[in-house]
Amino acid sequence: MADATPHDATPHDATPHDATGHRTAPRGTAPRATARRTTVGIVGGGPAGLLLARLLHRAGVDCVVLESRERAYVEQRQRAGILEQGTVDALRESGAADRLDREGIVHEGIELRWERRGHRIDFPELTGGRKVWVYAQTEVVRDLIALQLADGPPLLFGATVREITGADTDRPVIHYRHEGRERTLECDYVVGCDGFHGVTRAAIPEKHRVSHERVYPYSWLGILADVPPSCDELIYAHSRRGFALHSMRSATVSRLYLQVPNDTDPAEWPDERIWDELDARFAVDGEWKLRRGPITSKAVLPMRSHVTEPMRWGRVFLAGDAAHIVPPTGAKGLNLAASDVIVLARALAHLQRTGDTDLLAAYSDTCLRRVWRAEHFSWFMTTTLHTDPQQSEFQTRLQLSQLGRIASSPHAAAELAENYAGLPIG
Ligand code: FAS
Ligand code: PHB
């Protein structure tokens, strides 16, 4: 493998300059000109790229974010809903949590439901105080974009990265198209935060890149509905008809998911059919009732587990979905992206302060330990709670036994609670 230890670099003055060498747009506006050099080039303006930029900016490390989509598109993409303590702490440290602290909903547990019974998992009791926040990824992204456009570092929308060259040199270059022109950004380091379908992963030579993959034999049909949630905390339901999840976005908007076959067309699921099926899957003894309301969005989400190793090659790093994918049953995707960039920002700030590359050299191994823990937990939640149409009665009985064990053993419940609420980072 090429020398993957980044050469010592005393980060240069990377004030972004336009093609004529002048400083780019002053603080407070998105740069009209385009940057040509920076310390850290970040590909992708999703939660990973934006949080990394915020953390680096606060540490005085120059960076530029290149995002292919337009702002409106990035801000409306419906995705994750649960933030772990570590993610919330990082957003607070970077000054991006004001609205989260006003509007986020603190949750201290979840309910598991199966065979018409429910069992609550109490996070603080089982983890020594940890909890989670309900605050949609769309809101996290909105908050980070607003901060970055107001306070820097440069964030370019409509900037599509074509490729990264020089990954194993001390000057990797990002080649991208912006405002109709092919451009380059020379960096000390490049970080691929460009998601599962991005281009940065290809900077790792194929013969040195190992991918681990599992595709699940079912998908999720996710809906948003203008109806108050029928529960105070999330309900994860196992049923022989298939999995269902009751989440939320606010006191007036519910977010629900139900397991469907792969390649399901949302058009096959009119509102009435969705509510009837959810009713059947959430069925429980007692007074509980599922509130219905107008469904404002429907989308089918395939489910896969994926890990690319290593998460670094020379001076190019991968973070978030560019490096790994988890099925959303464990609410880990966004939080794993956040933990990657928290580790990376610490390493780059350490380099800037001390010139020492030891934390950077350890980045991939440090992150992969947590990635594989999250992969296992997401696989466990998915295979315990979903009913594969091909599964045997034996497999169903194993699932029911596991759920019964969690309900009867504080040790089994604590294992779930610790993983769900999030393990310490780094
Ligand atoms: P992202 O994919 O969010 O962002 C990558 C960014 O890079 C995008 O903005 C993209 O436009 C940009 N990009 C790509 N190629 C580029 C290029 N060549 N040049 C420039 N920019 C480029 N997780 C959960 O925890 N719970 C959930 O319920 C959940 N639901 C999900 C539903 C869907 C449909 C998907 C796809 C994911 C879901 N996830 C969920 C996981 C999701 O939240 C991810 O973990 C999270 O978005 C990861 O953030 P990033 O790594 O920043 O990647
Ligand atoms: C969501 O609110 O979108 C959500 C919550 C928990 C999950 C997955 C998605 O496990």
Image: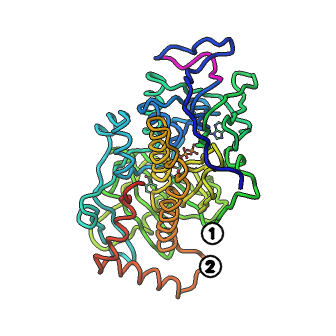
Q: Residue 241's x, y, as percent? A: 51, 73
Question: Badge 2 is on which residue?
Answer: 390
Q: Is residue 273 visible?
A: no
Q: Which quarter of the figure has residue 131?
A: bottom left
Magenta-colored stretch includes residue 34: yes
Question: Which residue corresponds to the image point at 33% horizontal and 56% vertical from the top-left?
Answer: 230
Residue 217 image label? 1
Q: Which residues are magenta?
A: 29-36
Whether disc 2's CB lies below 8 Å from ligand 2 is answered no
Residue 120 counted in the magenta span: no
| Mark sitting on residue 281 | none
Label 2 Cα crowd, 10 Å radius (few <14 / some 14-19 / many 20+): few
Distance from Cα at disc 2 to Cα at disc 1 = 9 Å
Q: Are marks 2 and 1 in contact (CB under 8 Å)?
A: yes
**Residue 11 found in image quarter:** top right
Mark nearer the N terminus (2 vs 1): 1
Q: Amino acid at mark 1?
A: Pro
